[in-house]
Amino acid sequence: MGIEVYVGQIAGTVTEDEMRKLFSVVGTVASVHLVIDPVSGESRGCGYVRMSSEEEAREAIDLLNGAKLGDRQIVVKNAPPKKFSKPGPSDGNRDSRSGRGEQQRSSTKPLKKGC
């Protein structure tokens, strides 16, 4: 499955292929994901790289944090754990007009990654 690292301060012109090439220096890159704004289609300046092992992920953090990619120094650190929304009272909308307190149905879905 691999271990994901967060990459920040990415220049808008950097591609996933360029990130894969840089990170492959420290190990096997399982996947690369640049976060793209859905409205503008432009990079949000961050992304995630999944390394094939925890050891390679640590090495990527140690060696590539502060490295230059494009025209910027990137930030490489542990990716935060994935968050999941949970259905419940705080997740639904109460119908205040009817007074019945009905909630909208929701399912447990991963939240979208952002910067």
Image (tube, rainbow, N blue to C red):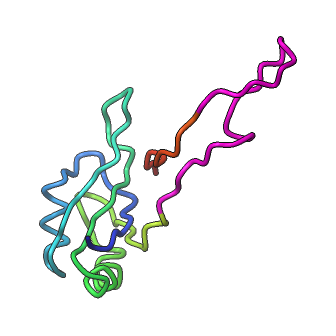
Q: Quadrant of residue 1?
A: bottom left
Q: Is residue 95 above or below residue 78?
A: above
* Residue furthest out toward the top: 97
In the image, residue 58 sits, relative to residue 33, either above or below, namely below
Task: Identify the main secondary structure in magenta.
Answer: loop
Please report the residue visible at 36 percent of the width from the left and 69 percent of the height from the top. 5
Q: Is residue 95 magenta?
A: yes
Specify the segment rendered in magenta. 82-105
Residue occupying the far right of the picture: 99
The residue drawn where x is 46% and y is 49% is 110
Q: Is residue 114 left or right of residue 93?
A: left
The residue lying toward the viewer, choosing from 38 and 1, is: 1
Residue at x 24%, y 63% (from the top left corner): 69
**From the viewer's perspective, is 78 left or right of 84?**
left
Q: Position of residue 30 (x, y in %)?
A: 18, 67
Provide residue 6's location: percent of width, then percent of height: 39, 65
Q: Nearer the viewer, residue 90 or 57?
A: 90
Q: Is residue 40 magenta?
A: no
Figure quadrant of residue 96: top right
- Residue at 22 percent across and 51 percent down: it is 14
Residue 83: give x, y in percent of width and height: 52, 56
